[in-house]
Image (cartoon, rainbow, N blue to C red):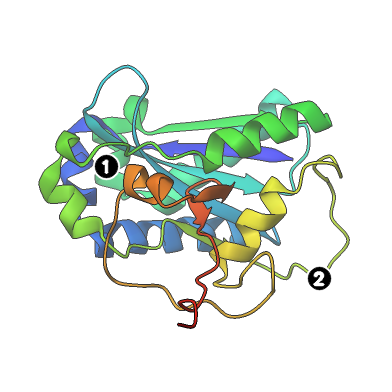
């Protein structure tokens, strides 16, 4: 599995504060990777780092990748920068237009990367209240390509966490396979836990079945 990370300079993070701008950038990234020959993949945003609460978005990209020799890796990085950013931006911010790549070649490494990419990074709305309100209902993941092909990598069979996450991201219940209708009323994780919610994938919880009141 190939794991890419696209990061822009901190000075330009205000350009990615709206749902529209982040959505447009992610779609552009997916188109570029397809042009580079990656037939399918997944993108997911991270918004905050582990060390502070400063908004610093970067886009994770998972692809059916392989080990890249240093010369080929640098060529692909240069192609990504050239197709994603204007000539003016490349000349001004070249050293800060970070494109990182790792090849994950074992089930343990693949699972670790999947869990890392799928984790939530915006954990408290007090970090940026305005951004939290504007981000409501934003689709944080995106994908491209056909997924009916044989996979080039597989997570361990015993762990169904990622399969459940992929199904839920498509709006399908991972338990009964029915189409989901999402409520537009926001809630909090502590509130759900007090109602007996059980996490079934990163950021997704299952509430106990609602039963009719007892007959009198």
Q: In this view, does 40 lie above or below 65?
A: below
Q: Mark 2 sits on what residue?
A: 148
Q: Give the percent coordinates (x, y) of residue 81.
A: 44, 43
Q: Can residue 77 be seen in this view?
A: no
Q: Residue drawn 71% across and 62% down?
A: 39
Quadrant showing the C terminus: bottom left
Q: How crowded is mark 1: few (under 14 residues within 10 Å), some or many (20 or more)?
A: some
Q: Give the percent coordinates (x, y) of residue 70.
A: 68, 24
Q: Give the percent coordinates (x, y) of residue 158.
A: 84, 41
Residue that lies at the very extreme toward the left in this rendered image: 130
Q: Mark 1 sits on what residue?
A: 89
Q: How crowded is mark 2: few (under 14 residues within 10 Å), some or many (20 or more)?
A: few
The front one of 216 and 202 is 216
The front one of 112 and 77 is 112
Q: Residue drawn 49% across and 83% down?
A: 215
The front one of 81 and 204 is 204
Q: Residue drawn 30% across and 49% down?
A: 188
Residue that lies at the very extreme toward the front in this rendered image: 216
Q: Give the percent coordinates (x, y) of residue 209.
A: 55, 67
């Amino acid at each position: 599995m190939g794991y890419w990370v696209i990061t822009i300079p901190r000075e330009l993070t205000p350009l990615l504060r709206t749902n529209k701008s982040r959505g447009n950038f992610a779609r552009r990234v997916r188109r570029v990777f397809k042009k580079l020959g990656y037939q399918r993949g997944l993108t997911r945003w991270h918004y905050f780092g582990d060390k502070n609460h400063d908004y610093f978005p970067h886009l994770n990209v998972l692809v059916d990748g392989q080990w890249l020799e240093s010369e080929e890796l640098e060529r692909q990085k240069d192609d990504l920068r050239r197709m994603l950013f204007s000539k003016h931006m490349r000349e001004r911010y070249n050293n800060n237009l970070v494109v990182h790549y790792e090849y994950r070649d074992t089930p343990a490494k693949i699972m670790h990367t999947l869990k890392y990419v799928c984790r939530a990074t915006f954990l408290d709305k007090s970090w940026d209240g305005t951004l939290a309100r504007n981000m409501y209902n934003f689709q944080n993941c995106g994908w491209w390509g056909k997924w009916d092909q044989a996979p080039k990598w597989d997570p361990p069979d015993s762990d169904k966490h990622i399969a459940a996450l992929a199904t839920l991201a498509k709006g399908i219940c991972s338990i009964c396979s029915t189409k989901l209708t999402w409520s537009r009323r926001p809630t909090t994780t502590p509130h759900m836990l007090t109602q007996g919610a059980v996490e079934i994938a990163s950021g997704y919880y299952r509430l106990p079945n609602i039963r009719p009141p007892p007959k009198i």
